[in-house]
Each structure stands twice: as C-alpha cells, then as structure tokens.
Image (cartoon, grey):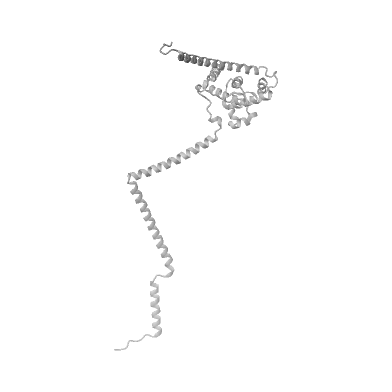
Amino acid sequence: MPDTPKMPHGLDAHNRQDQALTSASQRPGMAGLPQMLGRAVVSLSQHSLAAVGLAVTAALLLGLSQPGLRAVVESHTLGWLQGRQEARTEVHTTDNNAELPEALTRTTASEPSALTGEQAAVAEWIAKRYRIALEPVSRLVLEAWSIGPRAGLEPTLILAVAAVESAFNPFAQGSGGAKGLMQVVAHAHLEKFEPLGGLRAAFDPVSNLRVGALVLKESIAEAGSVEGGLLAYMGAYSTSQQPGYPQRVLGEQSQLQQAAHKAQATQKSAQDTAQDRAQTLAQAPRGAPIH
C-alpha cells in the first residue's frame, strides 16, 4: 500500500492549535460565571418567596375555613381594636380635663335635700326674697357653711355680703373692676383666682364666694372688727363714704339667722314631740289603747 503522505511538522502543529481554540470557544468562559450565579440566586429567591406566600395563603384559608378558629381570631382582633380605641379616648379625655379650670368642671347647683334643716331654711328665704332658683342657692349655702368655719366667719355673714353686693347675681359688674357675686375686684386678687381658673372665675358663683370670703376674712383681721372689716372690704375706710354699708350687711345677716333659728326651733320641737311620743309608748301598759 502506498504510504500516507505526512504533513509537515509546522502545518500539523498549526491545525492542533486551531482545534484547541475551537474547543475552548465552545465551553462557557470564566468571565460569564458571576452573571450565571446571580441569575440562579434570583431565580431561587423568587421561587422561595412564592413558596412562602403559597404556604401562608394556604394556612389562612385552612384556618378561616374552621368556624372555631375564625371566631377566636375575630375575637382577639376586635378586642385589640377596642382596647386601642379606649386607650386613645381615655388619654384624650384626661388631657382635656387636665386643661379645664376647676370653675368649669364644678357643679354650681345642688339638691335642696342635701341641706340640713337650718341650711334649707336659709336657702328658701334667699330664693324667695331674691326670686332665684333654689338649686343654685342651695349650692351657695353649702359652700358658705363649708368655708365659713375654716375662715373663722359666720356662714350667714358671707351670704349677707353677697346679698348686699349683688343681690345674688353672679354676673354683676360694679365700678372699679368689682365683679360677680361678692363684687370682688378681680385684678387686685389675681393670686386668689389663679387656682380657680384665673380672672374668668370671678363670674363663677362658687369661686367668687370663696375668694370673697378670703378677702372678707383679711379685711376683718386688718380692721380688728366686723364693722371695720366690712368697710375695708368695700375699700372705704371712712364712715362718711359708706355710712350704711355695715348696717345693711348686718341687717341682712340678722334675717338669715332668724330663718336658721326658726328652722332649728321647728326641728327641735319635732324631735321633742317624737321623743315624748316614744316615751309615752314605752310607759303605756301593755294592751292599753294608744290615742
């Protein structure tokens, strides 16, 4: 057989180099490996999130399809929402109340049934004389009986000053800045009105009565007598300026005291009658008729 012609050594080497380059070009290059890894990670993440979403959805559908479990979830959810609403409402209400002065949150009327016998008699006398409602008068009478002993003043004296000063008109406006029930010069006693709500509290009857009683107490202590204190309360230190003012106040107080004493006498008489009847019943022979 004829011998196969042999390639020259240089041409054979060149062909082998071309084949190597062709094989290398057909394999993925090292430069594209990071991009391929990135795409694989993204694809895996998408599939994992989808799997988690499907699992959560399936769990919700399974749970909500069971009435007992659904009722528990609804109950807890509703309770949480209601708790949140109540907490917000409570905070809002507390903040609003903290901002309100005492004069705006206090009731300025009371039931007459809350008064004692003498207090009720005084309240009724004032209500009839000045033609005003009994409930707000009852509140003022209770306040006078509360602050009177603490200030060392007769409750009827405090009420008598209010009667002469404003005829129990809580919105009265006098000269020189005098305001309210006891015609207190509010700007001169701002420190006393501050805890009660400031200058506007001068037109609150209970606040005005409290401050007026304090001013009256200081005036009497400074003057050394009730008559002198009444003149000082009016800002008149000379009897020629207000000659009849103390007498008017004391005359009003006398009528209030008479109403209170009459009620006390009536109450004592009723108590004595009840006591006598009880004693008679105790002393009567058993079986004897009682008339």
User: In the rendering, at what x and y percent does residue 235 appear?
Assistant: 67, 23
Who is closer to the viewer here, 250 or 191? 250
Vertical placement of 63 versus 98: above or below?
A: below
69 left or right of 196 in image: left
Q: Residue at x 41, y 41 (%)?
A: 79
User: In the rendering, at what x and y percent does residue 63 appear?
Assistant: 34, 48
Vertical placement of 239 versus 96: above or below?
A: above
In the rendered view of the protein, which quadrant contains the C terminus?
top left
Q: Residue at x 62, y 30 (%)?
A: 192
Q: Residue at x 37, y 44 (%)?
A: 72
Who is closer to the viewer here, 199 or 79? 79
In the rendered view of the protein, which quadrant contains the N terminus?
bottom left
Q: Is residue 138 visible?
A: yes
Who is closer to the viewer here, 43 or 221? 221
Q: Is residue 178 visible?
A: no
User: In the rendering, at what x and y percent does residue 51 appear?
Assistant: 36, 56
